[in-house]
Image: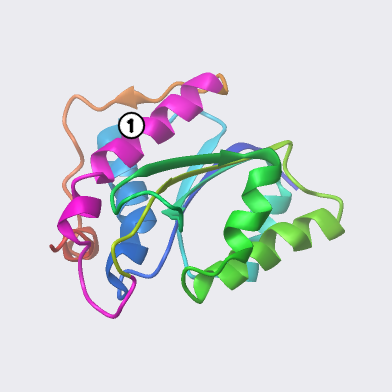
Amino acid sequence: MTRTSVLVLGLGNVLCSDDGAGVNAVHRLRREYELPAGVVALDGGTLGLDLLPLVERADRVILIDAVHDDGAPGTMVRLTGADVAPAVRERLSPHQIGVADLLEGAALLDHYPDEVVIVGVVPATTELGLGCTPPVHARIGELVTRTVAELARMGYPATPRTRALVPDDDARALELG
């Protein structure tokens, strides 16, 4: 099995308003930045345990997601270490059951990454609806910026593209709102 130095997963359900923030952010990251060798950035959506083989091969994982917290909608959240497990156990949406299971599965298989970081934003709503609410939509760029900062901190600096990739129709649809 080939190791991945850093796995970046955008998580969430784009059909549930702000829950799609992580997915929107990872698409934007891929369009606007050239990622260094060893970094893989993927739309993990709501795949949960299906992502286990990817997490098992990763030395470090950055999860980009909507995160329940006491802050106002749009508040940025960074969680690491012992703070990660409780955050994904407290269900914001059905996909977070899968995130908790994913991390517990990796631990049970003795393949828990050396580091897991959640870069998140507090949602206003995760009710059915396309597009993020204004306070969360306004923070998608900051989710990307903070993810790029985490990559640099880990020794894997991303380079801004001189010309952003043209978003495909799926990415355009994700950024409605």
- Quarter of the figure with the C terminus: bottom left
Residue 14 on the magenta span: no
* 144 or 89: nearer the viewer: 89
Asked where in the image residue 7 lies, by quadrant, the reply is: top right
Q: For numbered disc 1, what is the local secondary structure?
A: helix
Residue 159, located in which quarter of the rendered image? top left
Residue at 20 percent across and 57 percent down: it is 168
Image height check: is 50 above or below 66?
A: below
Residue assigned mark 1: 145
The residue range painted magenta reads 126-153
Direction from residue 75 to residue 50 in the image, left or right = right
88 relative position to 18: left or right: right
The foreground one among 105 and 80 is: 80
- Residue projecting furthest to the front: 70
- Image: 73 above or below 116: below
* Residue 40 placement (x, y as % from top left): 51, 42
Image coords of residue 149 (percent x, y): 42, 25
Identify the amino acid type marked 1. Thr
Rendering colour mode = rainbow
**Rendered residue at 23%/77% (across/down):** 129
